[in-house]
Image: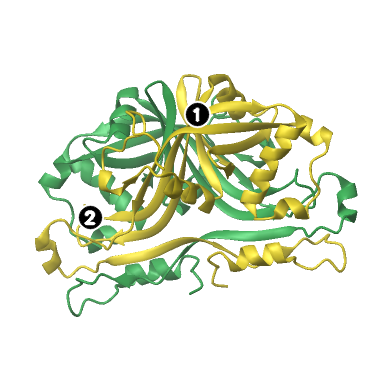
Chain colours: A yellow, B green
Amino acid sequence: VEYPKTKQNTIKRGNKKAHYDKKTIYQILDNNEICSVAFTMDNLAMSQPINYGRNGDKIYLHGHKKNKMTETIIQNGKVSLSVFQLDGMRLTRSAYNHSVNFRSAIIFGDVKELTTDEEKLIGLECIINHFVKDRWNHCRIPNSKELNATRVIEITITQASAKIANARAIDSDKNDYDLDYWAGVIPVSTCYGQPINDEELKKDVKIPSHILDFYHNHQQIKE
Amino acid sequence: VEYPKTKQNTIKRGNKKAHYDKKTIYQILDNNEICSVAFTMDNLAMSQPINYGRNGDKIYLHGHKKNKMTETIIQNGKVSLSVFQLDGMRLTRSAYNHSVNFRSAIIFGDVKELTTDEEKLIGLECIINHFVKDRWNHCRIPNSKELNATRVIEITITQASAKIANARAIDSDKNDYDLDYWAGVIPVSTCYGQPINDEELKKDVKIPSHILDFYHNHQQIKE
């Protein structure tokens, strides 16, 4: 199933790397912790990093009720956000062909503020479980005071595109292959370290399986 | 030396984490490969990831001459971009206090297109050496055909702010410390793998020291 290709989301440059199918776009969203939300402030476009969650074609964001960015995108009714994952650095013989391997997604959507406690809890559960799978069942869920201080936003994806580059260090000028410069790829990945117990952790609380699973299911930092 | 605190760059929420000094802001820019550039397209703010370089208060970007984003920010004359580095995931007893450790910077600047080959080469050298230190001296520099196909943009930073969070998994409600939920931090880092020779590398070309240094001076993927 694909998102429609419109003037807004159609990739022009590097269109061989373009993808519009939901499966690819959802995988990129699910693989990353942070998205970059664009909004306009004082007549200038800005971007701000934030956590999120995804369920089907809905993306959930949250922020303190005094947060300017959430206020702005609610008022605007429409929003664009992007996710970028760096997979490798391509070092070619020519400066010109230096590039990166990556997976990125650009999302366009309609913004709706969730206002009932029931709706807010659904959005927050999605965000917390996106952070660490199954975490919602292993923490204290928000009380009404906390829900009142939090704005939860539901974005319905209306248009989206992904771009994936995964290639060797290719030089476009064949003559460059005769040069003595080193060329190759340096892999890049977001990596996780061993979970560190909080110093005020209650005695006898062990690192639970949902946390160990998270650590073992992701690329790890060499320590 | 600090950037001025104006209406545009002053951090309101979480202002204890705010920094305005150039040293901190430059370090965040220098530690990261990718920034997120904000721009307006068809009346909607968007953000797009891109490589960059920094020298003093100048940030350099480049793109193909047909690239829409570079065209748009040149026409606008002003731009905002952000850089975000995830350092850790804070998992608290309460869902409400889940958070991340991070270092981020938001930059506001004036945009100037570099038009002479000499100026363009200065910008491109900065971008390539930001990618991998000293790489410019170990690759073929761009020829005039390549320079003609490339737009190089110089952004002079006029305002900037940074935000740094580096804390334990702190619950704001003291009662939560009696709960049996696990709390702690999972460290996060961008990590690099061992450099992989290109399959068409000339015989006898070894991995040079600027590449080995890059690998050894960064956090590494556990392989």
Amino acid type at circle 1 is Val
Separation of marks 2 and 1 at Cα, in angstroms? 36 Å
Q: Position of residue A194 (x, y in %)?
A: 65, 68
* Left or right for B110, reference B83: left
Amino acid type at circle 2 is Ala
Which residue lies under the disc numbered 2?
A95
> Dot 1, how many residues are within 10 Å of its Cα: few (below 14), some (14-19), or many (20+)?
many
| Element type where label 1 sits in the image | strand
* Left or right for A94, reference B215: left
Q: Is residue B20 visible?
A: no
| Element type where label 2 sits in the image | loop
- Please tell me if label 2 and label 1 are on a single chain: yes
Instruction: Say which of A60 and A199 sits in front.
Output: A60
Q: Position of residue B112 (x, y in %)?
A: 30, 30
Image quadrant containing the N terminus of chain A: top left
Q: Chain of mark 2?
A: A
Q: Position of residue A183 (x, y in %)?
A: 25, 66
> Dot 2, how many residues are within 10 Å of its Cα: few (below 14), some (14-19), or many (20+)?
many
Q: Is residue B110 above or below residue A21?
A: above
Determine which quarter of the picture holds residue A187: bottom left
Q: Residue furthest bottom?
A: B204
Determine which quarter of the picture holds residue B133: bottom left
Q: Residue furthest front?
A: A1
First in sequence: mark 2 or mark 1?
1
Which residue lies under the disc numbered 1?
A79
Q: Is residue A130 visible?
A: yes
Q: Position of residue A197 (x, y in %)?
A: 75, 64
Q: What residue is rendered at 29% in x and 32% in y?
A: B68
Image quadrant containing the C terminus of chain A: bottom right
Q: Are marks 2 and 1 in contact (CB under 8 Å)?
A: no
Q: What residue is rendered at 32% in x and 33% in y?
A: B69
